[in-house]
């Protein structure tokens, strides 16, 4: 099932089968070049597979943007320990809903990507860690896995290649933190999702303390096309140092919200105006978050000449992140936005690192009273100071994820904080304070 | 404890999905799937899962308190989860949540007197481009308005 009309400006690589009849079935997959990348890879040496992924300039699509080929290259292939492939399908960064459509519409593409990763490091088992709320996707993936076993694309001696691989789904049970790779691995082992101290990285000691490739759903989904058509063809779609397309979720105050597959380097303005149909109700853009709520916000002026890619966003001191674009129009209260984002991170902090646990909780309290009109001028600096004191002082990026948008909102929308200093509830709306979890 | 044949089959499959000696990995899925069947996580279930995966009940309790979908108290037959996170908020998800509370006469994580409904304000559920979104049990509903929510809840009430 599709949720939005595709845009003619999309570049369909990962979404090429979307809209075909029974796009999720193995028959449709096989009839449309499915598993051809795997068959090609099965005839290659592992280092040749990794070389193609390196040539493709594929970078991790979960948010961090780390070069995928390099990550795979870190796995000690000749280690006597078993190796594992783990798929991060714990999609939960606010603003992000792309892995959902990839698994729903083309589950075999994900399976093929995992198989190719398995070939590249001599792994024979893998797990797809799917967030608990995505129960219907676990059912879709389980059905696809059963089809793949039945038709000999999983299990022993796959298609006579001599390669064995078993793949399983694993459900989460409600925890944003488990989208962080080391917390996910803890959760996969039946523990609380608390991040591990690194090094060692998952490539060396991942699932069950064995060498592991761990990537986002979208990253694995890009791999079949890379092996099928060659890494260079994928690289050519994007920009130097970042190949291919990015699944981009348009959310918030936009006329045509939806998930679109756009070439890396797609101009932001064209994305908003032509793909997204412009800001809702003819309003002006106030704030733009490029890739999930953990990214620093940009103002309309900062979007001048910006493109949807890693470098263009880094130049503006933000991140491409997960591709979860959040668009806020001129009527949005930025104090309320900062508060809602902080409430989320306070709720999801695992409590392991004190700067994150205490910082998010205090920031939530201060922002709540500030939005209610009970703040003081001193609070504005305090919000910024507490956030800056969290940066880089936690084992995992959740502390930074909470601090970065907050710092940017205080710096770029300071006047809105001052507007809240009149002792009355939020001047931007009539409904008063927000409900509190 | 005895479970349905389907759930037992699921448990068997889960316990075989992980490397030898790593059956603890099955704990969280087993708790969630069992909760779906019996309605909540009871002490009896904790002991049962602990025995099956080879850990102490304390180790199960320690884990289950971490995960927001694992509940030690019963939920309503229909658990209405309204997202108010940023992308849904921009589409009045907070007002939708208030509307759901008012309509059902209950607040966050409360269960209606007849046990039919419970409500929860939840964090991002991955439906950001189709906001505001809610989940009733595991079913997603997108582009929800107060009117649509009323229809949905009235329909479920009649179905009882």
Image (spheres, helix red, strand yellow):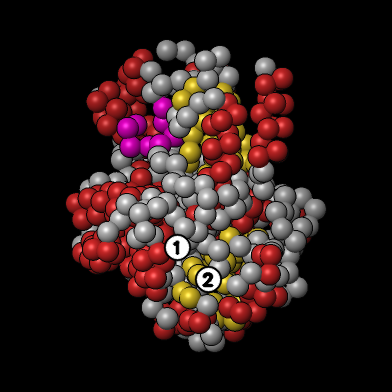
* Prevalent SS, magenta region: loop
Along the line of sight, the residue nearer the viewer: A74 or A412 = A412
Q: Which residues are magenta?
A: B64-71
Residue farthest along the right direction in this orientation: A21
* Residue A371 image position (x, y, % from top left): 39, 54
* Residue A286 image position (x, y, % from top left): 53, 71
On the rendered structure, is A183 left or right of B78? left
Q: Where does label 1 land, which residue?
A: A334
Disc 2: host chain: A
Along the line of sight, the residue nearer the viewer: A410 or A138 = A410
On the rendered structure, is A288 left or right of B142? left
C-beta proximity under 8 Å, tags 1 and 2: yes
Q: Where does label 2 land, which residue?
A: A286
What residue is rendered at 66% in x and 39% in y? B146
What residue is rendered at 57% in x and 66% in y? A329
Asked which secondary structure carries label 2, the reply is: strand
Distance from Cα at disc 1 to Cα at disc 2? 9 Å
Is any atom of residue A430 visible in this view?
yes
Q: Is residue A341 above or below residue B71?
A: below
The image quarter in which residue A390 lies? bottom left
């Amino acid at each position: 099932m599709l949720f939005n009309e595709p845009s003619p400006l999309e570049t369909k690589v990962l979404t090429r089968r979307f809209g075909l009849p029974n796009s999720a079935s193995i028959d449709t997959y096989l009839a449309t070049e499915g598993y051809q990348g795997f068959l090609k890879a099965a005839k290659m040496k592992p280092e040749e597979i990794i070389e193609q992924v390196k040539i493709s300039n594929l970078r991790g699509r979960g948010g961090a943007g780390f070069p995928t080929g390099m990550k795979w290259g870190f796995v000690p292939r000749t280690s006597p320990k078993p190796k594992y492939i783990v798929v991060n399908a714990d999609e939960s960064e606010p603003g992000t809903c792309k892995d959902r459509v990839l698994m729903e519409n083309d589950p075999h593409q994900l399976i093929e990507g995992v198989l190719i990763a398995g070939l590249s490091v001599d792994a024979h088992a893998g797990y797809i860690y799917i967030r608990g709320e995505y129960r219907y996707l676990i059912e879709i993936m389980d059905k696809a896995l059963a089809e793949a076993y039945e038709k000999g694309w999983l299990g022993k001696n796959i298609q006579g290649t001599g390669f064995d691989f078993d793949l399983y789904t694993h459900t989460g049970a409600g925890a944003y933190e488990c989208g962080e790779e080391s917390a996910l691995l803890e959760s996969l082992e039946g523990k609380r999702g608390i991040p591990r101290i690194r090094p060692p990285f998952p490539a060396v000691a991942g699932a069950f303390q064995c060498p592991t490739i761990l990537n986002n759903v979208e990253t694995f989904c890009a791999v079949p096309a890379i092996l099928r058509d060659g890494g260079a063809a994928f690289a050519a779609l994007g920009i130097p140092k970042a190949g291919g397309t990015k699944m981009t979720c348009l959310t918030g105050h936009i006329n045509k919200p939806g998930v679109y597959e756009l070439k890396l380097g797609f101009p932001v303005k064209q994305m908003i105006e032509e793909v997204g149909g412009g800001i809702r109700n003819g309003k002006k853009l106030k704030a733009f978050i490029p890739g999930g709520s953990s990214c620093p916000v940009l103002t309309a002026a900062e979007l001048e000449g910006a493109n949807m890619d890693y470098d263009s966003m880094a130049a503006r001191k933000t991140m491409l992140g997960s591709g979860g674009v959040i668009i806020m129009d001129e009527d949005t209260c930025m104090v309320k936005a900062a508060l809602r984002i902080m409430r989320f991170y306070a709720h999801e902090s695992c409590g392991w690192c004190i700067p994150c646990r205490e910082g998010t909780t205090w920031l939530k309290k201060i922002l709540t009273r500030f939005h209610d009109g009970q703040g003081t001028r001193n609070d504005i600096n305090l919000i910024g100071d507490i956030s800056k004191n969290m940066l880089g002082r936690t084992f995992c990026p959740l502390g930074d994820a909470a601090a970065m948008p907050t710092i940017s909102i205080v710096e770029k929308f300071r006047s809105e904080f001052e507007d809240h200093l009149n002792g009355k509830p939020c001047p931007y709306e009539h409904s008063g304070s927000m409900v509190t979890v | 404890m005895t479970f349905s044949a389907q759930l037992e089959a699921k448990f068997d499959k889960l316990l075989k999905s992980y490397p030898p000696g790593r059956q603890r990995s099955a704990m969280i899925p087993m708790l969630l799937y069992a909760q779906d069947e019996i309605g909540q996580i009871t002490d009896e279930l904790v002991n049962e899962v602990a025995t099956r995966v080879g850990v102490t009940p304390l180790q199960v309790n320690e884990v289950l308190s971490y995960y927001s979908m694992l509940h030690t108290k019963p939920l309503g037959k229909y658990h209405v989860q309204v997202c108010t996170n940023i992308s849904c908020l921009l589409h009045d998800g907070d007002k939708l949540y208030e509307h759901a509370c008012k309509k059902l006469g209950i607040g966050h994580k409360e269960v209606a007197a007849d046990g039919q409904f419970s409500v929860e304000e939840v964090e991002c559920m991955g439906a950001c481009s189709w906001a505001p979104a809610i989940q009733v049990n595991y079913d997603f509903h997108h582009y929800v308005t107060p009117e649509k929510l009323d229809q949905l809840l009235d329909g479920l009430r009649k179905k009882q």
